[in-house]
Each structure stands twice: as structure tokens, then as C-alpha cells.
Image (cartoon, rainbow, N blue to C red):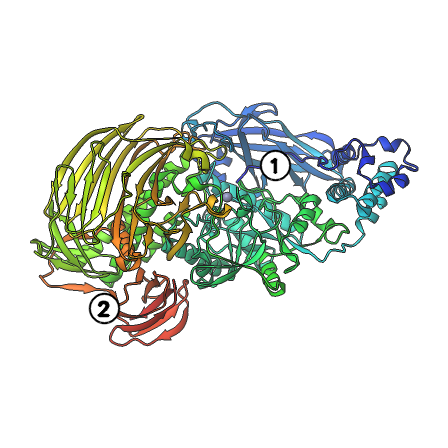
Amino acid sequence: MFLRYAPLMVPQPTTPTRTGALTRVSPDRQANVLEGMGTVAETDLGSKLGTLLTAVEREHAPLELTAHSVRGEPVTFAEAARADYRPFRVGDRWGPPWSTTWFHVRGRVPAEWAGQMAVAVFDIGFQGNTGFTCEALAWRDGKPWRGVDPNHRCLPISSTEIDFYLEASAIPTAVVAGPAEAPSMIALRESGDPAFVFRQAELRIQDPSARKVALDFKVLYELAMALPVGERRAEIFEALERFARSEDAVELERALSRQSRSTHLITAVGHAHIDTAWLWPLRETRRKSARTFSTALALMDEYPDYRFACSQPAQYAWMKESYPGIYEGIKQKVTGGQWEPVGSMWVEADCNLPSGEALVRQFLYGKRFFMQEFGVDTRELWLPDVFGYPASLPQLIAESGGEYFLTQKLSWNDTNKPAHHTFMWEGIDGTAIFTHFPPADTYNGDFTAGQIVHSAADFKDQDRSSRSLYLYGWGDGGGGPEPDMIESAHRLRSLDGAPQVELGRAADFFARAKQQAHNLTTWVGELYFELHRGTYTSQARTKRLNRRAEQALREAEIWSVAVGTGYPADVFDSTWKRLLINQFHDILPGSSIDWVYEDAEGELEAVIEVAGGVTTAAQSRLAGDGDNLTVFNVNSHARREVVEADGRLVLVDAPPCGWASIAESTPAQVQPVSVSGRVMENGLLRITWDDAGLLGSIWDKQAEREVLTAGALGNALLLHDDNPKNWDAWDVDADYRDNFVRVTDLRSASVEVDGPLRAAVRFTREFGSSRLEQRMVLDAGSRVLRFETEVDWQEEHKFLKVAFPVAVRSARATYEIQFGHVERSTHANTSWDQARFEVCAHRWADLGEPGYGVALLNDCKYGYDILGSVMRLSLLRAPTHPDPAADRGKHRFTYALMPHPGDFRDAGVIAAAEDLNNPLRVVRGGLSMGVRRSLVEVDAPQVVVEAIKQAEDSDAVIIRLYEAWGGRCRARVNTSLPASRAFLCDLLERDRDELAVRDGQLDLELEPFKILTLKLVP
Ligand SMILES: [Zn+2]
């Protein structure tokens, strides 16, 4: 995630402090080195390296440039080639932010250079204005050729006449670290000032033998600098000194010929982490991919042993659509084994926030793409840069046919560094996955010898395994490996002082490492990331739209299946992909520039609209024509709820995963709800509040106990100062808790609805520059006290939390994650507990003691903290970087408190959270009274149906369900869908076992948190 554009750096010594070449030599060898050194003793080996590198290129011949500037959206090559070009000189300015300039490059290799290797060298302004960067794609003969960026500045020239184009993107870059306010990229799109100075465009001769010597020297020098004082280190320095005196390359070759004595084998995999959107919008990533992939393909031709691992099918799909030549090249190199598709997910998605079903679709679309396009069944989940990994992920990996997991992100933990690099990771259901954290602690390796040496030395599982993976190549903004890295790899293949190194494939590494490793440690539960805790909350509108979009698609699929014909498979395919791409690990977490959220909000609104349209059409077909009311329930439990129909409140009964005609009159058997003064009560709860609208008491009539802590106030809004030291949109620092104010200013309180089915009171508050309206709602017969909230949020660097101190004591609280839940401490006994001062949850969290508990539900929030007996939900943040106005403006969200007797499982907390998120829908139709249908009914309350959809490859129906309590159970499934045969499948809908089905009835056995995917063949 760091931008790491830097010119080639001569490595600087770290230890010991370098005052001259002699200090690097061990004392016992020093005498020998001193002997005969003469004037060379003055030689600075670092300077020598610089001199050698400079000598690789010589001579200069000019290139002629003309330019054509394009504002707004990029144009095709054909369009650009037809345009008028103006004269342009090195030293001229170009590139208003976010514009594109096409440079036509022409020239001639001087005749006297014949027989020598010529390169075109560019600096299009890489080191230009502070905070700006730029990149280009070179086009030759009308085809993408290679990327040109700060780390790929040379284009090899193979003909005398030179004629090609550079498509240069002017990309303003927000400064990444620190609390500074970022520029608005939306505003910069309109800026007219050129931001870059074109500094270099010329031909040079590259001398292969000088290059070889420079790289030989570089690897040895870096290796010596990385080694501890000792014989090998002294020996290398002696060789370097001898070379410096004699200029005899044999001195270097001899030192490089000493074979590695290490048993550790590093598999080095070329890589280019391309953030699908971050400090640039999606449209730029499409071009970044083209640049990076062209470079990778070109390097494969130059280095037949070069291997490049590339994740994110979404980026491949862009190539297929917009750069067919590159895509064809990728296909050939996949077939040849040099290009390795890795990853499994459609994009490298955030894993905290997407719903369980959305994660399934990441695997489904990602893995199917690789299989269909390349015949590759990826076995690894490849998420080097994602901000935490839920304990349900091992099962999802295994159930989609995977075996391995890779990340390195936990090396960034601010409190506890992971204890292992290779281990088994066991999820909530007991599935254990072979997991590897590359010990270089980076996915942007530079292939310096020092990084290789430290990578092996720091590997924490030496006694269990002798293999590790190393990802090298420029990343985040793409770019990928440069030729010198591959050259380093060749020299480090087996070099005394360093581990053994092979250029290889990730898949081979995983297979061999798993086979070779023994006695691996098992880590049980989530891989919580001890950083970036603000990403559960930042960019709240995008998070809300994401939740709504996930639900809208779920509903649209179920009702489309119910219709039985005309399932809009293509609509779902494209709409799901629009959602999935916006779950990328810098989009959904909230860590991107404003432009990205302009795009994301538009796209997610479109997903909701498309899916909503499908649902409306399907429901109107199911309900038919007429004026009777029909209620639709997408959830897999029966519901009795108050709903609004034509402006009236009605209490309705709705069947699971189904619909029913309903009467417009209300069944009598429910105790009414009412408001009087500052008291709201139904048959179960009695709520009172004070002058400031804060809750003083919630009395549970059934349990005969007070819900709130004695003397404490419930629904307390707390406005914290929120000034993270680094990573503004990403981080919440622990000390945010020290400074806060209570929002107690109440402008008005008014009763909006006073029974008998619903009671609602509206509270209006103002604080800072913001305004908050909250409707506190309680329905007849319900334990769920809802707070429907609208905020005009105009704060800066503030964090809004809501708190409920409750009279419940427990050392552990329970939080929903995808397909299950996890427990976390409510104290800070250990450093691991301490670091979890802000955690991620999905629709509910529960604090329970024997006999009683309280759940805090939400309809679009993800950040919680429960310390002692205080339950808090994170509502809004207001960072200024990388989006200067993140989260300012209007927000809507609902949270709810649900006090309950007994355990959260028996009390129906999971169902209540589902219901809060998926309201019943009432439509007019022609169903006669008494008509009801369930697509699926399950007789075990702990079994939840997550999805009902048509199969990807047939007209069979897929039903995904899971055990939600964490226990074993038997369940009988009754379905009204046609089912002549039934199969148990994996998440990719590949059949595993046939199940007995008779009269729409199936019997299942489920283990704790087990996900089952059923396929019903009509
Ligand atoms: Zn990333």
C-alpha cells in the first residue's frame, strides 16, 4: 500500500557505521586485507558501485518528440494516432492532473553505434512536483509494448528507425502518511495546469559486459553488507577490493561461484501488486494493468526462466475487453508456464466487511474465470495486503477447492507480531489451511541480497520447514519486477552466505512446502489485523450501499428462482461483478481518494436499482394482479411483524423463504405498545428517558430485571477526537478514547406514533456543525428497540460512537462474522486483548451471562467495542486523508438494542438481526386469502439459508445454508421447488455426493458452523 517509487539507490551501510572500507572487515582478517591495499584502501566501495552502474550506459543521441493532449476519459490508440501532434521538447511541461498526453517518439540510431545494444531512456517527469507521479504505456506498431514508469525507464531498441508512442497518464498522488489534508481529486480533474516536466528522452548504448560487472559487484556488495562479521563477509570484501584495484571481472566471478551452504530454499515469484482502485480511480487501474502486464510479457521473452504471479481476474477481464493483444500474450505465457494466475477471488477483496455470500461469490467468479479462460484451478487464496481475515475464511477456501492461504499484512501489527510464517490456520468450523506469510514481510520485494538474507534469517519456522516464498517487483501502483531484479536472482541462485534461491511458481512452492513441512503449529480463530481499525467505519455511505446491495441481490435471486422461468442469469453475472469489484481492499474499507467513492456510490446504487427491479418484477409475477396484500419474506424463519402497507400498520405472519396473502386487519393476540410522557412500553419492555432524551431505564417485564447498568444512561452518543498519527482514513489510535464529549443537547422530542402496533418518538439533536434526527421505535410484541437515524455530519477528525452500559457481566462477548460468530474478550488482560480495542462484526454483537443477554444490532455498521459491560457501536468518522471530505454530509443508519432472556441463540438474536436488515416486503396482488408458499423450510432453528439461486451451469437450483449456532444438528429441509435429484456441492457448485430427496424432503446432518451447498435438479 505504500508507494515505493524510487530511483535506483546505491545501498547504504547500516551496521557497523561505515567510515571506510576497512571497518567492514573482521578483526582477524584485517591484517591480510590491509596488506597490499595501497591507495585502494581509500576507495569507497559504495562509490565504486555507483560508478559501475553509471558506466552501464554511454553515449547520447536525441529523440524527437511531438505531443497530443487529451482531457477527460482516455482514448484508444487508433483515435490518438489520427490526432494532430504539436512540437514538444525535453524540458517542456505537460499533463494537467488526470489528463493523458500521447507522445510520438521518433529518431534514428547513429550509424556508428552499429552492432551495439541501444536503449531509449525516459524521464517523463517521475520526480516532478512533490506528490505527483506519472506513468506511460509504450505502443509500437499500434500494439501495447512495455510500461514506462520510474522503475522501468529503458526501452530496448531493435531497429535503426525509431517510431513509437507513449501514452502518458498524469496521476496526481495524495501524500500517504500523516494527518495532512489530501487534495480533492474530483476538484483536480478540472485543474488546467500541467503538472510534469519531461526531463529525458534520448538514445543510449547499453554495454552488456559493463552491466554484468556492475550487477555482479552490486550483489556481492549488498550481500557483504547484510552478513554478520565473519569469514564470508571478509572474503567478499577482499574480492571487491581486489576488483576495485585490478578491474578484473574474474575476481567477482570467483566470489560469486562459491555455492550456498544454506538448506533454506526461497522460491522467488515475480509480482506486481496493483490496487484495483486507491489513489487512482478504476479507470486508471485498467491502464496500470496494461502497462504492468506488457512489461511482464516482454521480460518473459528476455528471461525464459522468469515467472510472474498475477491475481485479480477482474483485471484480466479488463485486458480481455480493452487490450486483446495483451490478453492473448497472457494466454500464451500461461500455457508456457511463465505467467501464473494466482488468487481465487475476483479481486483481492477486503475480508472483514463483505457478507458471507459475497465472499463466496468472490471465489465463485474468481476461480471460474481462471478455469474457463486458462484451465487453471487455483489452490491458494492470495491476499497479501488485506486488513484482517475472519475465522470463517478457512472453510471458504477449502469449500471452493483451495488448500493454501497467503498474506504478509499481519507483519504490520502494531502490538503483537505473528509468531509464525508457516502454520496451519484453523477456522470456526475446524477446517485447517496451510498458511504462509512470506518472511520478507513485503509483497514488493526489491531483490537486494540483504532482503534475501534477512528473509531466510527471519523465517520463524526453521525447525518445521526449510522453504519460504519471496514476492518481488514494484507494487501497489503496479510496475512489477525490473530486469535487474531477475539478474540478482540469477546471481543469488546458490551463493555462499545467502539462502538458495529459485525463480518459481507460487503453486509449486505451496505444494512442496506443505509436503515438506512437519509439526506445524496451529493458529485457531481469526487473523485479526492490529492496525487500520478505522476501516470498519470510514466512508459509511459506501458501506451502507454495500450492505444494501448484498441484500438486494440475495432477494432478487430468491424471487427469480421462485418465478421458475426466465432467470436473468446475465444480469446477475454483471451485477454481482459490479458489487464484487467495489469490495476491493481499498474501496470498501474507506481508504481511497474521493473520486473512488464518487464511482463506488454510483455503482452500488446501480446494483441496488438493478436488483430491486428484478425483485419487483418477480414479486409482481408471483403475486399476480389484484388488490390483495401479499407479504414476502426472504429469511429462512417464519416472522410475525408489524409492517406498513399503504400507509397503515398491519401485523402480519410471513412464511420462511416465501410469501403469503395477508389480511389488512390485525390479529388480536398481541399486547399493544404505547407512549406516555417519557415512557414507552409494550408487553415485554418498558423504556424511560430523561430531559436530554437519554435512556435511564429499560425494564424487562418478562425477565423482571433492569437492562441498563444502575445509574448509567443508554443510547449515549459520544463524540471522540480522532487524530490517528498515521493512515488517517485507515487507523483509529487507542488514545482516541481519552477525549470525547457527550452529545446531550436535545432540540426537540416528539411522539410520532403512539400504538397500538408501533410507538415512535423523534429526538432532534445538534452538535458541532452537525444535526442528528433519531426515531426510537418499538413494535407490539417485539424486544427490538430500534434507533432509526439520519445525520447531517459536518465534523472533522471526530469519531461518533453510541454506548449502552448494560447490567450483564461476562469476560467474553460474541460478534457475528460471515457464516458464524466469534468470541472476543471484554477486558484487556493480554496484549492481544488490548490490541482488539476496536473490532469488526456484521449484523449483531451480544453480551450475555447465564440466563440473560443484550444484543446490539445494526443495519450497515461494522465497528464495535465492548469493554466491561459497556457495549458500543461505531457510527461515523471524518478523516481528511486520502479523501479530504470523507463522510461529510448526509447519512442514514439504524441500530437496535435487543435485551433477551437466555442465550442469544435460543433468544433469536440471529433472526432478529437478519430481520432488521431484510424488511418484509408487502405488495398488491391477486393471491386469495390463505395462500402461502415457502421455497424452503428447515426444521432446525440454527440452520440459516443464505442464498437460493439458479446454478451457474444449468437450470438446477442452488441452496446455500449453514449451521449458525456452532453446534451439531440434524435438519430436515422441505422444499416446494422441483427436485428430482439433489446433490451436495462445493461453493463452485461442483457435485460431491448425491443426497436422497423424496417429495421435496431432504435430511441433513450439520457440524458446527458447517456451510452446505445443495443443488436441486428439477
Ligand atoms: Zn493493496
- As displayed, is residue 737 above or below residue 643? above
Q: Is mark 2 within 8 Å of ligand 1?
A: no
Per the image, label 2 sits on a secondary structure element best described as loop
Q: Which residue is mark 1?
A: 163
Front position in the image: 648 or 1014: 648
Determine crowd level at label 2: few under 14, some 14-19, many 20+ residues with C-alpha closer than 10 A. Answer: some
| Residue positioned 78% across, 31% down in the render | 19
Q: Quadrant of the C terminus?
A: bottom left
Q: State whether residue 402 appears in this view.
A: no
* Callout in the foreground (1, 2): 2
Query: Label 2 amino acid?
Result: Ser
Query: Label 1 amino acid?
Result: Asp
Image location of residue 232, percent across then percent down = 80, 47
Front position in the image: 540 or 322: 540
372 relative to 508 in the view: left or right: left
Image location of residue 680, percent across then percent down = 16, 42
Front position in the image: 227 or 38: 227
Q: Which residue is mark 2?
A: 976
Tell me the CA gap for discs 1 and 2: 68 Å
Looking at this view, name the residue that lies furthest to the front: 710
